[in-house]
Amino acid sequence: MVSSLDPSVKDFPINLDDVEDDDPPHKAQSESSKKTRRAANKAKDTSSEGVLIAEQIQGMVSAMKEGNQVFRDRYASQISGEDTFKLIQESGCDEDKIDDIYCFLMNDLSKLRAVIQCPPHRRKKVIMQMVFSD
């Protein structure tokens, strides 16, 4: 799942042969040094355009990767599901309500964070108020 969110330059293939020329095709003319220089300059321009496009795509790929990492870091759970379950049990919550509490906390990371930061002797009361109060 994460790998599908990480684009790379390979996702944007660039073939310099496919770069279209806006100028109409030239008529066959005698080879002169001036025309040869123009052709060489044109080839350089086409090549440099391709390089610029590749650099721009690389910059976009890097920005997307950085953005994806920010989202992963932002939405990562502070503790595992197993540790959350233990925390609820150790808080002294009723055994028949533990599953509901667990699902509630795992679906709302800000509330899970509040429970984790709450002093242990007050956790049960805070959990019950969060989950079961209207």
Image (spheres, rainbow, N blue to C red):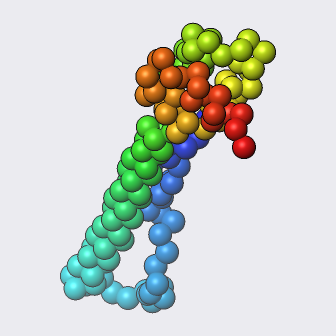
Q: In front here: 99 or 19? A: 99
Q: Is residue 123 left or right of residue 45?
A: right
Residue 134 in view of the camera: yes
Quadrant containing the N terminus in the rendered view: top right
Q: Nearer the viewer, residue 102 or 48?
A: 102
Give the vertical position of 108 relative to 35 (above or below): above
Q: Give the total of numbered labels.
A: 0
Residue at horizontal 48 percent and vertical 44 percent from the top: 71
Foreground of the two, 94 or 37: 94
Depth check: give the residue in front, 71 or 42.
71
For the point 46% across and 41% down, the residue is: 74
Look at 39% across and 47% down and name the residue there: 66
Q: Answer above or below: position of 56 versus 99.
A: below
Residue 75 horizontal side relative to residue 94, left or right: left
Tell me what residue is drawn at x 31 percent, y 73 percent: 45
**In the rendered view of the protein, which quadrant contains the C terminus?**
top right
